[in-house]
Image (cartoon, rainbow, N blue to C red):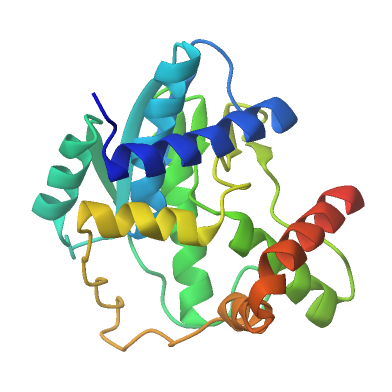
Amino acid sequence: MRASALEVKIHWVARRIARAQREFGLFTAGDRVLVAFSGGKDSLALLHALPAWARATGTPIEIGAVHVEIEGRPCRREALAAMAAAANVPIHFTSFAPDAAGPGPDGRVTHPCFRCSRLRREALLRLAVAGGWTKVALGHHLDDDAATVLMNLLYRGRVEGLAPVRSYFDGKVVVVRPLILAAEKELAAIGRLLGAAIAPCACSDGRPQPPSSSRERMKAVLDALGRDALAAKRHLQRAGRGAR
């Protein structure tokens, strides 16, 4: 039977995961993998492509999803649960309490979005460790990685991208980025075919979130290269990996 357009798109992203597996050794047999699931196009594509890769390669791993909420502000649970069920992946929910505005541990005042991101990541890792999950899979992709390299070069004077694999808590849990070699447009195509269009949750203090971040601005710079953009992103990614 002829494959559907969605199956074809998932297949190609699964091939990107296969290449990342060969290059970075993301998974081992018996891994329990928790996908950080926001409901956006990237994590949604990962939720479908990762099981497809595991089936195609016969890699025995357990896959679950987790959505991290702000404490007392549950958001979109029914929609997220339905999206996870469509991928045949069980979903968990956890939350964190936002901290008060003010200096961070190093004494510097940070943007509330940075503090929120840090607390969200901590809650995610705590759940993974408590639940015995060996890997946490994030949805960062080629465009994110290339933009990070460019951002670090311009603002920090060093060539550094996103780590495909990084251990936390003395190796109790490992964060992996299976989509690191996949282009954002490939993931967006899967999102469109799945009809995913979920509005983001409100910020913890009710304020609208910034329309763009430094990484998003770097993406816009790269996309302005037109037909040369994809090659430029791959070159930046290779440069970032070579610097580690």
The percent position of residue 108, horizontal first and vertical second, equals: 66, 81
Quarter of the picture containing the N terminus is top left
Q: Nearer the viewer, residue 63 or 169?
A: 63
Q: Residue at x 25, y 85 (%)?
A: 206
Q: Is residue 36 visible in the rendered structure shown here?
A: no
Q: Is residue 214 visible in the rendered structure shown here?
A: yes
Seen in the picture, residue 60 relative to 194 is either above or below; the reply is above
Q: Nearer the viewer, residue 87 or 169?
A: 87
Seen in the picture, residue 125 relative to 74 is either above or below; the reply is above
The answer to whether residue 117 is left or right of residue 82 is right
Q: Residue at x 89, y 68 (%)?
A: 158
Q: Residue at x 66, y 73 (%)?
A: 227
Q: Residue at x 24, y 37 (%)?
A: 91
How many numbered discs, if any?
A: 0
Q: Nearer the viewer, residue 58 or 80?
A: 58
The answer to whether residue 32 is left or right of residue 176 is left
Seen in the picture, residue 2 relative to 220 is either above or below; the reply is above
Seen in the picture, residue 21 relative to 156 is either above or below; the reply is above
The answer to whether residue 121 is left or right of residue 81 is right
Outermost residue on the front side: it is 2
The percent position of residue 100, horizontal first and vertical second, equals: 41, 77
Name the image quarter holding residue 234: bottom right
Q: Nearer the viewer, residue 96 or 173?
A: 173
The percent position of residue 201, horizontal first and vertical second, equals: 24, 71
